[in-house]
Image (cartoon, rainbow, N blue to C red):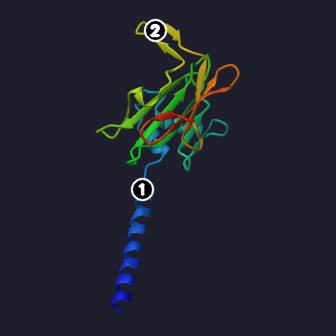
Amino acid sequence: MKTLSILAALVLAGGICAQDSRATDEKRMTVVDYFLLLPPKYFEATPADWLSFLRQPKCGVVDLANGYMSCTGDGAQPEFEVALFRYRDGRPLLAVCSGELEGPDSLFLEFFEPGADGKMHKMKRSIFPVADSVTFDKSGGRTERGNWRFELPRRGKTVLVRDQRSGKILRKLTWNGERFQDEK
């Protein structure tokens, strides 16, 4: 009888722990929640305005289950993609990929983490081993570094680096919970 009581207590405790775990998962923030915490002037309009825009027909995708968003952009804002990755300890890492207004898409890749103020802040690029295809100096001069573009994953954790012209995959970089590493 004593063994049965202990077993019942363990089953009950396991059920309570599982219930608490589900409640925590339900409260976990989504890609949209973090997108809305990006700096208000990061895009041509606020993130909230872009969220409204991309929810229109044929203007974008919001995939909460996979932590992915894409937006077609408009005349003032190039198209962009957003993907949510998580560190091993559960902290979020938001990747934003965009192109030039009147040029190629997906040339720029930036990463954001939440700061002490609860807003998303741009972080150093040391977690990702490939530079942007194009850079600009302080005077606005443009320098082309390569002929590649980035493709964020709608599913999974692998960012593709593709040749701009042919679309051939040059590198596959997979998020390991700490940094992006070349897939072998």
Query: Cβ–Cβ below 8 Å for labels 1 and 2?
Result: no
Which residue is found at the position 44% from the left and 41% from the top?
A: 34
The relative height of residue 21 versus residue 37 in the rendered view (above or below) is below
Between 42 and 156, which is closer to the camera in this rendering? 156
Residue 101 shown left or right of residue 35 in the figure:
right
At x 43% / y 39%, what residue is drawn?
A: 93
Q: Nearer the viewer, residue 55 or 90?
A: 90
CA–CA distance in space, label 1 to label 2: 43 Å
Q: Residues within 10 Å of mark 2 (few under 14, many from 20)?
A: few
Decide: is 28 above or below 126.
Answer: below
Q: Give the residue pinned by disc 1.
A: 27
The local secondary structure at tag 1 comes to: helix
Residue 128 placement (x, y as % from top left): 46, 29
**Residue 75 position within the rendered picture, expressed as x and y whole percent measured from the top left:** 60, 22
Q: Residue 133, located in which quarter of the rendered image?
A: top right
Which of the two residues, 14 or 96, is positioned nearer the viewer here?
Answer: 14
Q: In the figure, 149 relative to 140: above or below?
A: below
Q: For the view shown, which residue lies furthest in the left direction?
A: 116
Q: Quadrant of residue 125?
A: top left
Residue at the location (41% across, 46% down)? Answer: 88
Kind of residue indicated by mark 1: Lys
Please tell me whether mark 2 sits on a helix, a strand or a loop: loop
Residue behind mark 2: 140
